[in-house]
Amino acid sequence: MSTALLDQSTVSKTLRNRPFGAPQSEVMPEELAELDLLEGDDPLESDWHVAAMNLLINTLRYLWRNRKDVYVSGNTAVYFDPQHSKRRNFRGPDLYVVKDTQKRPRQSWTTWEEGDLAPDFILELASVSTAQFDRVEKKNIYEQRLQTPEYIIYDPITNQFQGWRLRSGRYESMVANEQGQLWCEELGLWLGIASYDFDDGAGLVSTPRFFESTGQLVPTKEEMQARRAAVEAEARWVAEAEIIRLKALLAKQS
């Protein structure tokens, strides 16, 4: 059967149901084994998922734009096979952060090529079809195999987070504050909910955002530029108003 005729639901179901770590050729048709898909990871399911993921990634990259020791990415493969195979034992987190490493462009994150470093922080944006997988299979992998210090799931249906922090080799549930935010020790930031307009015609929608320890929203590059433009515009207005006042005063005195 031609791979061009295989629908995505068939592919995803086959990938998701095969034993973790088993070579693709042993559990699926040869045609499927040739597909470049992340095992156990469906493609992002909606425009919101894509936009929300990119918003979070770009926010952190801008926040840490002057740092050279942190890598931020998402929806790219994280390889962690003990035998250094790239045909099994990999995942594609929606957002992941690796600290104490070199910031540079990568096609993927390969642990054995990165000094055996694994992500320090992972966030998954759940959907109806992935929520259970995110909470069970992925949680086990991130806890036992990658030993990622912090793992959080955001469910857009309930608009809530569920997170775990690694303590003595085991995940312990994170406790949200009164605003429903989770403190991310690895990032030094709160993860919460805010309204955002993705310019997709939907208007303001709820989406995950990062917040400083003070509670201030971590801005995107565009938001920071807009703030600066607003401050500059106000300064110009004040200056122009002062010139008008002084001119009026001089005219009155003459």
Image (cartoon, grey):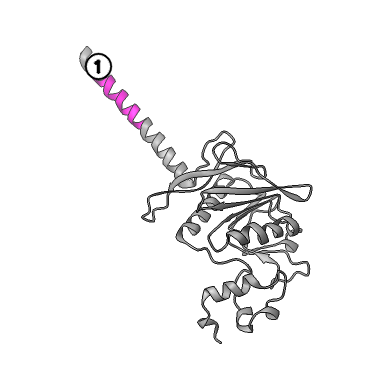
The part of the chain drawn in magenta is 236-249
Q: Quadrant of residue 189?
A: top right
Q: x, y percentage for residue 44? A: 52, 63
Above or below residue 77? Residue 68 is: above
Quadrant that contains the C terminus: top left
Q: Is residue 137 above or below residue 234?
A: below
Does the magenta segment cover residue 189?
A: no
Q: In the current view of this chain or complex, which residue is farthest to the bottom? A: 1
**Residue depicted at x 78% and y 66%:** 82
Mark 1 belongs to which amino acid?
Leu
x, y (%) of residue 166? Answer: 73, 48
Q: Quadrant of residue 111?
A: bottom right
The part of the image, by quadrant, that contains residue 201 is bottom left
Which residue is at the front of the view, 160 or 184? Answer: 160
Q: Nearer the viewer, residue 254 or 77?
A: 77
Give percent across and percent down for residue 54: 51, 55
Residue 105 visible in rendering = no
The residue at the point 60 percent across, 83 percent down is: 31
**Residue found 71% across the figure and 56% down from its top:** 118
Most extreme residue toward the top is 253
- Magenta stretch holds residue 246: yes
> Image check: 207 left or right of 23?
left
Q: Is residue 34 above or below residue 76?
A: below
